[in-house]
Image: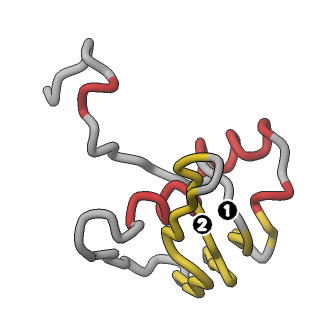
Amino acid sequence: MIEARNLTKIACKGPASEVVVFENVNLTVETWKIVSIVGPSGAGKSTLLHLFGGLDTPTRGEVLFKKRNIFQWGAPELARFRNRHVGFVFQFHHLLPEFTTL
């Protein structure tokens, strides 16, 4: 199970400019459940998934995996978590130009 508790992400656009991506998100995904996250462009879907995978850090709140806050882990433990429990299909295919779909 993975759970978001009061997850908030605020992006800084400049020294005096902040954008609230989302605030106080609470979401629980039970083991073996399939969840779809939908919304308009810019709603924070990718940001939420990056936080769930430990690729980004929240401004506030926590992501719990098996009741442990992943943001208290060091880089090796986060890498192990991603390697064993998380799968990503990035929407920006140009990040790996040497690979094709085949």
Report the side of 101 relative to 4 (left or right): left
Q: Where is residue 16 in the image (x, y as percent from the top left)?
A: 63, 55
Rendered location of residue 60, percent (x, y): 73, 71
The x and y percentages for residue 48 are 49, 65
Residue, x 37% and y 78% (percent of image)?
A: 35
Residue at x-position 67% and y-position 62% = 58
> Looking at the picture, which amino acid does disc 1 mark?
Pro
Pick whichever of labels 2 and 1 is earlier in the sequence.
2
Q: Residue at x 52, y 81 (%)?
A: 29
Within 10 Å of disc 1 (Cα), the crowding (few <14, some 14-19, many 20+) is many
Q: Who is closer to the viewer here, 72 or 6? A: 6
Amino acid at circle 2: Lys
Q: At 63% from the left edge and 73% from the top edge, which residue is drawn?
A: 8
Gap between marks 2 and 1, in whole Å? 5 Å
Closest to the observer: 50 or 67?
A: 50
- Where does the image place residue 36, in percent across and percent down from the top left? 31, 76
Which disc is residue 79 wearing?
none
Q: In the rendered image, which residue does mark 1 sit on?
A: 58
Judged from the image, the secondary structure of the residue bearing numbered disc 2 is strand
